[in-house]
Amino acid sequence: MDGGAPPIGSSDAGACDADGEFPSAEGDRCYRVTSDVAEWLDAREACVRWGRDLVSIESAAEDDFLTQRLSLDVWIGANDRALEGTVVWADGGALSYENWGDTQPTTSTRRKTAARSG
């Protein structure tokens, strides 16, 4: 995909009832997807303004949950901005779970998702 995309982010669950927010299956995280279309840095900034960061997908169960819940491509926190070819989460943490598509990772994946983790 060559255009911009909206973000998905996460945080600890809290109320999780604002526009674009939905709880994780376990209720311990709150995800937010905006209708903004943006590049990765813009997506991250939108999540940071929300007080969180782009989502870090930590398990196959979380990946499956988000895949079923979302009908669009979204930006996640995985990136290699600091060192080309070394993918980490937006907060600098190592990936403990990976499920790349056949042509991923690539810089052309576009949607932003902010997430809060508990």
Image (spheres, helix red, strand yellow):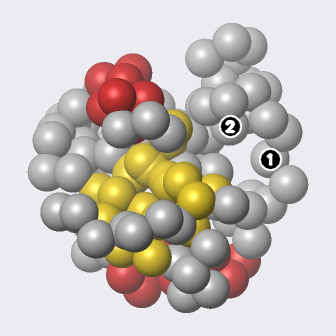
Residue type highlighted by circle 1: Leu
Q: Are marks 2 and 1 in contact (CB under 8 Å)?
A: yes
Position of residue 94 relative to residue 92, above or below, is: below
- Say which residue appears at 34% left-offset and 58% top-offset: 32
- Say which residue appears at 73% left-offset and 13% top-offset: 83
Position of residue 61 relative to residue 38, above or below, is: below
Position of residue 9 relative to residue 106, above or below, is: below
How far from the left and from the top, in percent, is residue 4? 21, 35
Residue type highlighted by circle 2: Trp
How far from the left and from the top, in percent, is residue 26? 62, 86
Q: In the rendered image, which residue does mark 1 sit on?
A: 95
Furthest toward the top, the residue is: 82
Q: In the rendered image, which residue does mark 2 sit on?
A: 89
Element on which disc 2 rests = loop
Q: Quadrant of residue 88?
A: top right
Q: Quadrant of residue 25?
A: bottom right
Q: Earlier in the sequence, mark 2 or mark 1?
A: 2
Element on which disc 1 rests = loop
Local crowd at mark 2 within 10 Å, few (<14), some, or many (≥20)?
Answer: some
- Say which residue appears at 37% left-offset and 81% top-offset: 69
- Say which residue appears at 51% left-offset and 38% top-offset: 53
Left or right: 1 in relation to 13: left
* 107 and 41: which is toward the camera: 41
Local crowd at mark 1 within 10 Å, few (<14), some, or many (≥20)?
Answer: few
* 92 and 107: which is toward the camera: 92
Q: Which mark is residue 117?
A: none
Disc 2/disc 1 C-alpha distance (Å): 7 Å
- Quadrant including the C terminus: bottom right
